[in-house]
Image: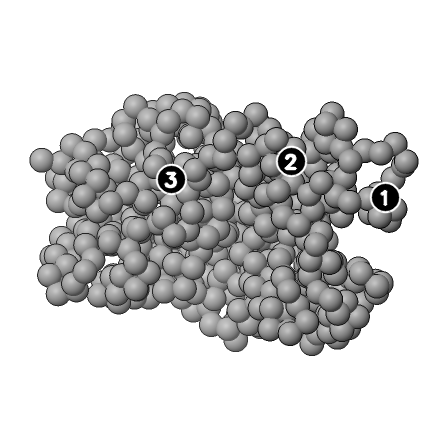
Amino acid sequence: MSLNRELADCFEQIADLLELTEANSFRVSAHRRAARVIADSTEDFAALAEDKKSLMAIEGIGQKVADKIVEYVHTEKIAERETLLEEVPSGLLDVLKIPGVGPKTVRLLWQDRGVTCLADLEQAIEDDTITDLPRMGAKTVENMRKAIRFASKETERIPLGVAASIADVLVERFEKMKAVKRVVCAGSLRRGKETIGDLDLLIATKAPDEVSETFRTMPEVEEVLAAGATKSSVRLLADVDGRKRRMQVDLRVIEEASFGAALMYFTGSKQHNVRLRERAQKQKLTLNEYGLFPEDGEGAAPQKRGVKPVAAKSEEEIYAALELPYIAPELREDRGEFDLSAAPRLVEVQHIKSELHAHTTASDGRLSIEELAREAKARGFHTIAVTDHSKSQTIAGGLSPEALRKHIAAIRRANETVEGIAILAGSEVDILPDGSLDYDDDLLAELDVVVASPHWSLKQDAAKATPRLIRAIEHPLVNVIGHPTGRLINRREGLTPDIREVIAAAKEHDTALEINAHWMRLDLRDIHVRAAVEAGAFIAIDCDVHSASDFENIRFGVATARRGWLPKDRCVNTWTAAKLAKWLKKNRS
Ligand SMILES: [Zn+2]
Ligand SMILES: [Zn+2]
């Protein structure tokens, strides 16, 4: 009778899969009912399948279900199930088994947050990136967390935004200590990498014992891994936005006189430091974490032999002594920075004067148009674009064409009432799988700005993804391509188009490519930005604002831009209001 069990499971699974694809609810319940009938029956369905009529005589078994039973008995497969499994990641069926997590929620997690299996969900809970979804209060998430047995995640690299929150707390704490002269978090965090291993905290002080003791007894310390005179290591269990995070932090206590050398050494990258030391050698100098010293042929550790350094106090003077321009931390990856004859004028956070990608309560944002505008104005912006979701984004409250027309009118009114900032009417319009857009052109033409973004069909291969993105780029009314690949860091690869072709099209059609500043996305990524800079395309750095705090993510977007060597003037958000408005007009009459 185990065939009955198999059949029942099969129909139950088809029902789940149908539900995850938002199929007609009658189809879903027909399969559920069949599963229940089969599971509850004492009849042998293998035998019943010999005669379809006897199957259909059973209440709850219609003709289509009967066909599938016959199919399974003969082939051990149901074609419909195979097709659905191609469409829906099978790991979602595990997610669906978590108590209290219904198909609507799972679909939302999948489509909106890229969750495709239990491991993904654990990560999303860790990252606290799901509590802003509907029906996903802190309590629900806590219950989910309990339901999933946590595997140890301590070895995984932590997203930049999370590591930065922890670092901010530490830096602020030690800055308040009287004995402390300087505090910097070095390492890959300072270089703005998208994920971080450990934190490297450097502190200049004349009271190393006091500082080290304070460090090792911080309330977040879960375990002291090392405790030396100038170096300590701890593992923290820190609270980030209400979530517990484990992270290793190494402290180095340094004398102020050699702070620059230590900062350079512990900022890295390894490859950059190797090149620096080679360069020093060629100039008959020795570079280490204590300074740049004359090579006296007496062996290592010149600082211990009282040799006076050529430079040590600041990074600037060390680079100068090595006959290099100052190289910003984000550039220190041995990606050509040693060929620079002058420091490039890279974009900085304070250069950003507009936000071109923001959602309001009209779709899935938390701010009204006016609140959004005031937040932007308070940050010194001259322009904010309201770009709510388009009609296909039903989960995110995408606007129907009629709703968008009303929304445009509301935005125009708000633009009259809120002074000191231009509020633009826009849309984050979906790029459909074939590259067409989710609204008609005459509606798009009524807008001031169009951000076109891919949100689904993100597993397309390059042969489809490249023309898809290029078609949107070529559209005369599109100004910005939002999060062009749709990737989610550590969780979803997203589209993998031929990025050079995409960039060439963007350059040709005067369409900007976005760096989505959310630390979960950072899309475009640094190497894509670099290619865009080399091709001469424009970049928009946008926070994809859903709530006021999202504006704070700009620093991660700017860090990514700088890692891609983006000069200020190639970033459209740094332009004056007039220059930006002129560019946005594009082919609008
Ligand atoms: Zn989007
Ligand atoms: Zn958005």
Residue 122 at x, y percent in the picture: 61, 59
Q: Which residue is denoted by mark 3 in the rendering?
A: 568
Q: Which mark is residue 57?
A: none
Q: Which residue is denoted by mark 2 in the rendering?
A: 321
The residue at the point 65 percent across, 33 percent down is: 322
Q: Which residue is denoted by mark 1 in the rendering?
A: 301
The residue at the point 41 percent across, 42 percent down is: 347
Which of marks 3 and 1 precedes in the sequence? 1
The residue at the point 27 percent across, 30 percent down is: 510
Left/right placement of residue 62 relative to residue 374 reads: right
**Which-is-in-front pick, marks 2 and 3?**
2
User: What is the secondary structure assignment of the residue under circle 3?
Assistant: helix
Q: Amino acid at mark 3?
A: Lys
| Nearer to me, 64 or 179 | 179
| Nearer to me, 26 or 580 | 580
Q: Amino acid at mark 1?
A: Ala
Label 1 Cα neighbours within 10 Å, binned few <14 / some 14-19 / many ≥20: some
**Alpha carbon of mark 2 to alpha carbon of mark 1: how far?**
19 Å
Residue 250, compared with residue 286, is above or below; it is: below
Q: Amino acid at mark 2?
A: Ala
Which of marks 3 and 2 precedes in the sequence? 2
The residue at the point 46 percent across, 34 percent down is: 344
Residue 508 at x, y percent in the picture: 30, 23
Left/right placement of residue 401 relative to residue 428 reads: left
